[in-house]
């Protein structure tokens, strides 16, 4: 029994070993950078190490006995994310990332691991929290996030297009907005495409070979690569690349610079240069271009030919030799050089003069400064044109001109004499025309007076017929009727009735003759009523669809005007019946200001208005010519509108009061 018990020495040794182990543990716990805290089931701190105090910047002694949630996060209750709660509940370790709060308000990002602690009987008596300061880790994450945001901003915001392609498959993995705009695709559409899909077929082999050369590192930049847009158009891009490893895949990052405009500009410039060279070589002018110091830059073949400069001198481009060769041919070389030096000294001036040669040749020399659109000076251009033949021609022309001037003076004298004779003849002719116009006016006035006299005679005859013949016939009819009633035999009664009927017919004919000679209605009821009666008579006698329309306004007409207009309307209606082949005619009267307008419009065959003065028209009764002349005499006029097959409208325009009557009224 005694032998089984440990000796005192053994107990001492075990105690010493335990103390050493505890010392090692304490040293380890106290010197570790992690915060270690023992917490009971009520969330009170039982023990903590120096590391926890350093993290919270607070002595250990002020932590023991305090609630962990108040000391760690300054809360009034257990944290909902507390890993200790989960560790005690599950019996398994738990962890969480959170932010601790120190007494001074500063915040501390931490990672907490919680482990359950058990009694000897297995009951949970609390948990241990191991707290790691992850401030640097968080700062690194933020720095990485900022870096990613910067690179994302550069990737998405750069004006250059960027495409990331798998070198092996040549499929695209990433595309920035700029390349999407360039090619007209969305990013998702480009991710479904590859290198062969964005180049024209006829240039595909070249584009693929350049891509592969860049992938092998043989080239960094390839220029003017044709790229195919979604809409089928082609753009040209300079593409620089860098090879990178993305997600374990070797990729090529291509940077696309759109040079389409530049390429088109270069092509246009090349075309213009070629065109200018062609123009220069085909020009009839000798052309010389010099720089700002007067050194020759360019000259065409014509220049050498015109100045007879040997080809071997032109090939050397020795300006001094070319100049001496040119000067030796001139009449006044000093004047030539003086002008050249002046223009080189005055860069902005233009010049044009003539150069005389010893052999009689003459050159037209024009010079102008060379400047670009910004005004930068590059030198001067000279144009030389051989005008020898032109000068000879001018001399011949000048001689011919002198001879012509002599002939012109002689001819002028002859013409002046002829003009004087012609002027005399014109004067005589004007006098004859003036007499003719006077005769025409007198004739027009006489015709008007004759017409009015005729109307007065018609009126007198109509009155006499009405007052005498018609009245006597009417009385005779009454007496015959009385005799008929007192007849002694039926035979006598029948004969008297026949005589009465004959007298009645004569009375009716007399009445018609009276209206035809001078309608009483024109004097008794006025112009409008007379025209309306005339329209009815036309409709009745000729079966036309005749219509009259008046605007209802008063039209006080001078007697002569009224007679003229009535006669004209009657003549026009007769013309419609005889010549127009119309089915309908319309006569309308209206007052417009101090004028009366009378229109006669038919749907007949019409006629050529240009022929209204022809003999055919002038012989038709009153005639349009006579109507116009009559209207002109009273201050009116005649308007004619007619087209073949489209009918005719003739408008009579006359003053409401006759001008002569106005003048008479003023004299009175």
Image (spheres, rainbow, N blue to C red):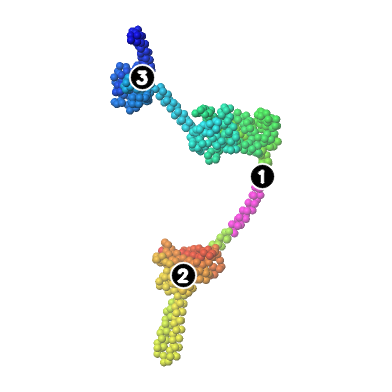
Q: Residue 218 location in percent, x, y? A: 58, 27
Query: For the residue carrying disc 3, how many other residues have a C-alpha within 10 Å: few (<14), some (14-19), or many (20+)?
Result: many
Query: Is disc 3 placed on a helix, strand or loop?
Result: strand
Q: How many marks?
A: 3
Who comes first in sequence, dot 3 or dot 1?
3
Which range is magenta? 401-425
Could one spot residue 465 in this view of the protein?
no
- The single residue placed furthest to the bottom in the displayed view is 488
Structural distance between the alpha carbons of marks 1 and 2? 78 Å
Residue at label 2?
546
Location of residue 48 with respect to 307 vertically, above or below: above
> What is the CA distance from the residue labelled 3 to the residue labelled 1?
118 Å
Viewer-closest of 231 and 552: 231
Q: Nearer the viewer, mark 2 or mark 3?
A: 3
Residue 171 coordinates in the image, percent (x, y): 53, 34
Queried whether the magenta region covers residue 420, the answer comes back as yes
User: Percent from the top left, x then y, of residue 297?
Assistant: 63, 31
- The disc placed on residue 35 is 3
- Residue linked to disc 1: 397
């Amino acid at each position: 029994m005694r032998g089984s018990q440990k000796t005192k020495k053994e107990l001492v040794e075990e105690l010493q070993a335990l103390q050493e182990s505890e010392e090692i543990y304490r040293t380890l716990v106290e010197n570790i950078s992690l915060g270690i805290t023992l917490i009971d089931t009520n969330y009170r701190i039982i023990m903590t190490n120096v590391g926890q105090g350093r993290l919270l910047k607070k002595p250990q002694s002020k932590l023991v006995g305090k609630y962990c949630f108040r000391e760690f996060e300054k809360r009034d209750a257990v944290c909902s994310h507390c890993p200790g709660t989960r560790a005690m509940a599950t019996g398994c370790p738990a962890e969480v990332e959170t932010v601790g709060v120190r007494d001074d308000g500063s915040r501390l990002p931490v990672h907490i691991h919680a482990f359950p602690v058990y009694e000897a009987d297995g009951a949970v008596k609390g948990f241990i929290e191991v707290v790691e300061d992850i401030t640097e880790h968080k700062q690194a994450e933020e720095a990485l996030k900022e870096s990613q945001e910067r690179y994302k901003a550069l990737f998405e915001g750069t004006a250059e297009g960027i495409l990331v392609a798998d070198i092996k498959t040549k499929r695209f993995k990433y595309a920035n907005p700029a390349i999407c705009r360039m090619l007209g695709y969305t990013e998702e559409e480009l991710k479904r495409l590859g290198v062969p899909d964005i180049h024209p077929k006829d240039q595909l082999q070249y584009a693929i070979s350049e891509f592969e050369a860049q992938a092998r590192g043989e080239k960094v930049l390839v220029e003017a690569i044709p790229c195919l847009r979604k809409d089928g158009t082609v753009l040209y891009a300079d593409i620089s690349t860098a090879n990178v490893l993305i997600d374990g895949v070797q990729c090529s990052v291509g940077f696309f610079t759109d040079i389409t405009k530049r390429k088109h500009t270069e092509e246009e410039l090349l075309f213009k240069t070629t065109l200018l060279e062609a123009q220069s070589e085909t020009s009839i002018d000798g052309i010389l271009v010099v720089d700002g110091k007067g050194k020759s830059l360019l000259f065409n073949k014509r220049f050498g030919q015109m100045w007879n400069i040997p080809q071997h001198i032109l090939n050397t481009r020795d300006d001094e030799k070319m100049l001496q060769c040119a000067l030796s041919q001139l009449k006044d070389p000093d004047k030539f050089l003086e002008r050249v030096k002046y223009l080189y000294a005055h860069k902005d001036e233009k010049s044009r003069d003539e150069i005389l040669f010893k052999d009689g040749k003459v050159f037209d020399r024009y010079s102008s400064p060379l400047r670009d659109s910004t005004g930068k000076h590059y030198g001067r251009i000279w144009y030389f044109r051989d005008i020898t033949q032109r000068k000879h021609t001018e001399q011949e022309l000048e001689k011919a001109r002198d001879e012509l001037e002599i002939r012109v003076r002689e001819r002028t004298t002859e013409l002046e004499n002829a003009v004087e004779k012609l002027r005399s003849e014109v004067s005589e002719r004007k006098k004859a025309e003036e007499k003719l116009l006077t005769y025409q006016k007198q004739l027009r006035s006489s015709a008007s007076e004759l017409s009015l006299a005729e109307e007065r005679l018609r009126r007198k005859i109509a009155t006499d017929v009405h007052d005498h013949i018609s009245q006597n016939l009417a009385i005779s009819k009454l007496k015959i009727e009385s005799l008929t009633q007192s007849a002694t035999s039926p035979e006598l009664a029948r004969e008297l009735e026949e005589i009465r009927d004959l007298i009645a017919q004569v009375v009716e004919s007399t009445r018609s003759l009276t209206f035809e000679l001078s309608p009483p209605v024109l004097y008794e009821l006025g112009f409008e009523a007379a025209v309306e009666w005339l329209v009815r008579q036309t409709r009745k006698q000729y079966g036309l669809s005749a219509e009259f329309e008046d605007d209802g306004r008063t039209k006080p007409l001078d007697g002569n005007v009224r007679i003229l207009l009535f006669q004209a309307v009657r003549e026009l209606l007769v013309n419609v019946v005889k010549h127009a082949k119309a089915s309908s005619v319309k006569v309308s009267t209206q007052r417009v200001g101090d004028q009366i307008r009378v229109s006669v419009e038919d749907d007949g065959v019409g006629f050529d208005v240009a022929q209204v003065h022809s003999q055919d028209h002038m012989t038709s009764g009153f005639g349009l010519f006579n109507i116009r002349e009559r209207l002109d005499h009273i201050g009116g006029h005649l308007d004619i509108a007619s087209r073949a097959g489209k009918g005719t409208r003739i408008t009579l325009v006359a003053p409401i009061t006759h001008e002569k009557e106005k003048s008479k009224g003023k004299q009175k």
